[in-house]
Image (spheres, rainbow, N blue to C red):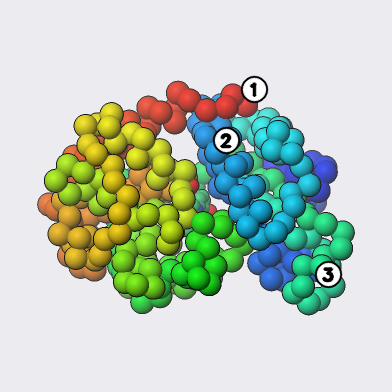
Amino acid sequence: MEQVVYVDGTFVPQSEAKITVFDHGLLYGDGVFEGIRAYNKRVFKLERHVERMYHSAKAIDLAIPHTREELTDLILETCRRNNVVDGYIRPIVTRGPGDLGLDPRKATRGPSVIIIAQPKIALYPKEKYDKGLRLVTSSYRRVPPQSLSPSIKSLNYLNQIMARIEANQYGADEALLLDIAGYVSEASADNFFVVQNHALMTPPTSTNLPGVTRETVLELAATVGVEGRERPFTLYDVWASDEAFITGTAAEIGPVVEVDGRKIGDGVPGKVTKQLMKAFRELVTTTGTPIY
Ligand code: PXG
């Protein structure tokens, strides 16, 4: 059955879901989005994702033409119309249609609001979770906050796409990006953690996206008996770590077993990582906003 997409006030079949080629989201990447998941007929951390979307929009001076409550309801309604049980949800708000020219004032009609709710999500193959991911450090640095805040989940992903292309060329599963000062930042679309001496470490969010999965893992740390810390660290700390993993809404918790040709720990998914994966699974399948 064809999916139903919300576009600017109406629900339409996917094949009829269209926006104009003059939309500034397409022309200039002028817009924001979210990536949200549903598990077991509930949307995981919906309120937090909606909050992040409003923060991103505020940062680019884009007024979302709905209250948070309205947008939340529209997201849930899009899930219902697509019979979502487990799925992937993508709200997008762009600057909207306007004449050529990047000045946002040209987008006179106002923002476009799009919500996609897919009843299926394409995951990394199961093998990647059993055997672990291989990462390479990118030669591209994460765009620094001096140029564009990495906290904004904007429609500009070329920095990360360049890194991903490079990782593909090296036959790696993911790219690890450093910040402009040489400290570890994040993967192309996931946050990054190392485990050292029974403590988790992840870089502060000044140089990466404040990931919802990242926050969740920091909250879960205590339940598996480890401390979760936010502090800057270098590639040396990665290579010398006992375990490493990436976190993201799509990837969830993905064990990392190799970085730049060096084995991490024993070269297999680590004990703490596996405990966190289990605790995460338990949390996502038992909490969240009910869809129905
Ligand atoms: N860093 C970046 C740059 C991201 O884009 C994350 C970290 C992880 O954040 P969350 O909140 O998801 O834990 C992201 C999230 C996709 C896709 O379609 C990308 C993300 C999320 C969902 C789907 O590739 N990025």
* Residue 16 in the figure: left or right of residue 240: right
Q: Secondary structure at mark 1?
A: loop
Q: How would you rate the neighbour count of disc 3 (Cα within 10 Å): few for under 14, some for 14-19, many for 20 or more?
A: some
Residue shown at 32%/50% (left/top)? Answer: 230
Residue 186 horizontal/vertical position (percent):
38, 59
283 shown above or below 135: above
Q: Amino acid at mark 2?
A: Leu
Question: How many numbered marks, from 0 up?
Answer: 3
Disc 1 target residue: 292
Residue 199 horizontal/vertical position (percent):
21, 43
Q: How would you rate the neighbour count of disc 2 (Cα within 10 Å): few for under 14, some for 14-19, many for 20 or more?
A: many
Which corner quadrant of the image does residue 26 belong to?
bottom right
Disc 2 target residue: 46
Which corner quadrant of the image does residue 12 belong to?
top right
Q: Is residue 176 visible?
A: no
Residue 67 horizontal/vertical position (percent):
74, 39
Disc 3 target residue: 106
Closest to the camera, between mark 1 and mark 2, is 2
